[in-house]
Amino acid sequence: MSNLYNELTCLLEAASADVLELQRLHRRQPSSVTEDLVPGQRMIKTLLIGILCGAAALTIGILIGHFGITKSGSSAPPWLQDVAKDVDESLIETFLSEVNTLRIEENLRELTRVPHMATTAGDERTVQLMLKRWQDPETGLDRAWREEYLVYLSFPDPKKPNKVTVVGPSGDVLHAIREKEKPYTAEQEDPEVVQPYAAYSPAGHAKGKLVYANQGTPSDYERLNQTVDLAGTIAITRYGGAGRGAKAVNAAPYGVAGVLVYTDPRDINDGVTSDAGETYPHSWYLPPSGVERGSFNGQFGDLLTPYLAAKEDTYRIPAENVTGIPPIPIQPIGYEDAYVLICALDGDAAPQNWQGGFNCTYNLGPGFKPTSAFSASDVQMDIFNYEEKRNSSNVMGVIRGSVEPDRYVIYGNHRDSWVHGAIDPSSGTSVMLELSRVLGRLVKQGKWRPRRSIIFSSWGAEEFGLIGSAEYTEQYFTKLSERTVAYINVDIAVFGGATLSAAGMPSVQNVIFTAAKQVNRHKAPHAAAAEPLTFGLFAPQVAAPGRVSTSVYENWLRFSNRTSPALGLIPRLGHITGAGSDYAAFVHYLGITAMDFSHAYDRTKSSARTYPAYHTAYDTFDYASRFIDPGFLSHQAVARTAGNVLIRVADSLLLPLNCSDYAETLEQYLTTAESLYQEQLSAQKIPMEPLKRAVANFRSAASHLDRVIGASDLKNETPLKVRRINDQLMLLDRAFLNPLAFPEKYAYRHVIWASSSAGQPTFPGLADAYAQAESSGQSRDWERVHYQLSVLTQSIDGAAQTLVDVI
Ligand SMILES: *[C@@H]1O[C@H](CO)[C@@H](O)[C@H](O)[C@H]1NC(C)=O
Ligand SMILES: *[C@@H]1O[C@H](CO)[C@@H](O)[C@H](O)[C@H]1NC(C)=O
Ligand SMILES: *[C@@H]1O[C@H](CO)[C@@H](O)[C@H](O)[C@H]1NC(C)=O
Ligand SMILES: *[C@@H]1O[C@H](CO)[C@@H](O)[C@H](O)[C@H]1NC(C)=O
Ligand SMILES: *[C@@H]1O[C@H](CO)[C@@H](O)[C@H](O)[C@H]1NC(C)=O
Ligand SMILES: *[C@@H]1O[C@H](CO)[C@@H](O)[C@H](O)[C@H]1NC(C)=O
Ligand SMILES: [Zn+2]
């Protein structure tokens, strides 16, 4: 059987579109192919074409022969049925029923026993766990292995911990910032808990008057610089508003010597600040000494090997040439210490929208009030971080596809955490392990084999800058570009218990809806007990225990919806624009259709930026299982929904990617662009008509392809036609790549999905160029707008061209 599959795949590949194209060209205009060749070459070329056409004709003959036989019904070859096979709904039901909350819980317990920061012994322990599971003879995958990269990381020095102190005029230390978070459970006392630090902050010593710089955005420093001389100061900033590293990058031009960053209780805790009854271990809120760690590197992938896979012998740029990292020391601290510093600040009161959750007025500084204990004192930072190249592993596992093994559906999440990482990333890893167990078992029992290959990936060193996934896409660039159908990401699987949250290219909307409608939500057996502990952050559960309440889709619709011109009221699928997780390189660099799943808390009940223990020593199994997802039903809902999508993308005869839904988003982006920019662009004599025509072309090409699909009885079409349409759908996002679109943004090439500082829900390159031109008013900036408009127009037109009939 499997030999036959392989043979068929070979046939399909040999008789691929290229050959048919050549044959057609040859038949219609023989001279156009050979015209400008010298006689010898011409002869060889003609001969070659002849052979190829012969092979193609033979292949088609064989295929027609096979189909002829089927139609007559008697002796259909065994492969024919497999090649036309579609998603098996009963298999999906089996999958859904086997996803088990207890196993997810056990996975999480196992993954979070010890801290597992990238390349530590704890990380290696999780590598071994993934390998053991994926190589299990009963429930494993076909094959699993590790792939190593030598990557550039940054750590604090355990022998010389980073220090931040308030130093009086005579050099005496008046206050020292806590070096490690306060222990509430045994986990915080583990010696492997890394001291809070800013990865990629340079080592160094800085001392100066303290100033408050709000979120450390360019406009925050600009505003502060109007009244305060920033040279030689230490700026304290709160998380949010700007990227972590940007808070230091933006400060440096003003002569700021060092930066502190903390999480304001208003931004993370809904104002709650006391660990005597309010914060963890009493609720999901962050205790006063909790510190968000993180990478302060602004780009993704290994910093020393841009665009090259970081193998042992790969060329590396000199470390001093690395860009996008803090030029001055920066250190994160807890709000317990930030309170002491900020509430003692002297100077004018900060603007109203700079005020945070402390019960004092936030002043700008510089320096401390004469009436405070810190009068005339400086803040001193002693940072001892160091950089080092370390071996980091991705763990990969595959289930080989039966009919189209050379088409890949990739499902991934990172494995490394900052500390125990129960939610980030182990909630996602627990889900991935359960999903791969259920599918692996079906494969091992001989009950199922996907049509396309499934690649599971457990990325390493993601927390330092999405490194494992980026290196992988660089190493296998061509293969992945040509063969990947979609990338599915489940990183933080559960932020809270309220609703599914999903983001992705518009073409995946429909398959996500199909899956979400099929998954039911159950009431947690102990949800009633959980309710008071979790400050009402769980969705109201309506049904009796154990009874089906409502579908994931219906529930999602209640929390987040929009009205689509074509489909009416539907759940809101988010867009993937930035580099928030492991999908970044797939989306931005490779142009692979991608999606990201999680379960969210109710934002009407909490305005927390993210779940409060994010990147702290409190993100533990105890925290996750008591406050984020008691009963693990949200984990289960994500596993079922993402797994359902995975099976559908892997098994559907026709790829479940809808180009009309893509057209709708392009139209919305266009409408926004028209209302924001049309008037000024006309004044600048920059025409928007070509863009409007391109979007209209895309819509009509998408409608056309939908009609072609609708008019086809795909089960009885030739496999070549199905493969052709599938390739059109698979390659649609690739058509939007333009390496020239964002020359200043590392590895961003997808013209429609990129991070944009203008923050408008429209085409990012155009939005940013327009914002720049509008603020500067310079003609070369308006030329840049025109350039961006042309890049965009050409990309959309080019993409539309790939959807119309092949020739
Ligand atoms: C800060 O303000 C000073 C004086 O107002 C000005 O000369 C300087 O250019 C400003 N710094 C920056 C980086 O804009
Ligand atoms: C590193 O930076 C220096 C100074 O800017 C420059 O001269 C050199 O060409 C750079 N080297 C590489 C490999 O980029
Ligand atoms: C202000 O908040 C701090 C820290 O949360 C607390 O110790 C103090 O008692 C509060 N002061 C007042 C007047 O509420
Ligand atoms: C990385 O691994 C390779 C081969 O496994 C080994 O030769 C090399 O010494 C390792 N490098 C580091 C920095 O650990
Ligand atoms: C749509 O979402 C809003 C909240 O954004 C909610 O109030 C409304 O009830 C939702 N609509 C439906 C039909 O669930
Ligand atoms: C794509 O979605 C549109 C609605 O947006 C629908 O009319 C069309 O039939 C879908 N195409 C396919 C192939 O399912
Ligand atoms: Zn993270």
Image (cartoon, helix red, strand yellow):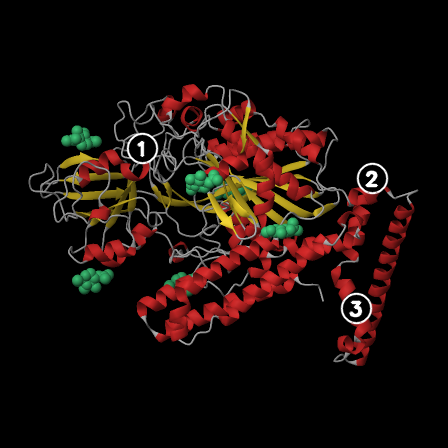
Return the residue found at the far left.
Answer: 371
Residue 418 in picture, x, y percent from top left = 41, 36
* Camera-nearest label, 1 or 3: 3
Q: CA distance from mark 3 to mark 2?
A: 34 Å
Q: Quadrant of residue 383?
A: top left
Residue 763 in view: no
Three-letter code for the amino acid on which mark 3 is drawn: Arg
Q: Which residue is mark 3?
A: 24
Residue 460 in picture, x, y percent from top left = 50, 41
| Quadrant (top left/top right/bottom left/bottom right) for the C terminus | bottom right
Residue 183 in picture, x, y percent from top left = 32, 25
Residue 625 in picture, x, y percent from top left = 44, 24
Q: CA distance from mark 1 to mark 3?
A: 67 Å
Label 3: element kind: helix
Q: Quadrant of residue 755?
A: bottom left
Q: CA distance from mark 1 to mark 2?
A: 58 Å
Q: Which residue is mark 2?
A: 1
User: Is residue 660 toward the left or the right of residue 278 in the image?
Assistant: right
The circle on residue 290 is: 1
The circle on residue 759 is: none
* Residue drawn at 80 percent across, 72 percent down: 26
Q: Earlier in the sequence, mark 1 or mark 3?
A: 3
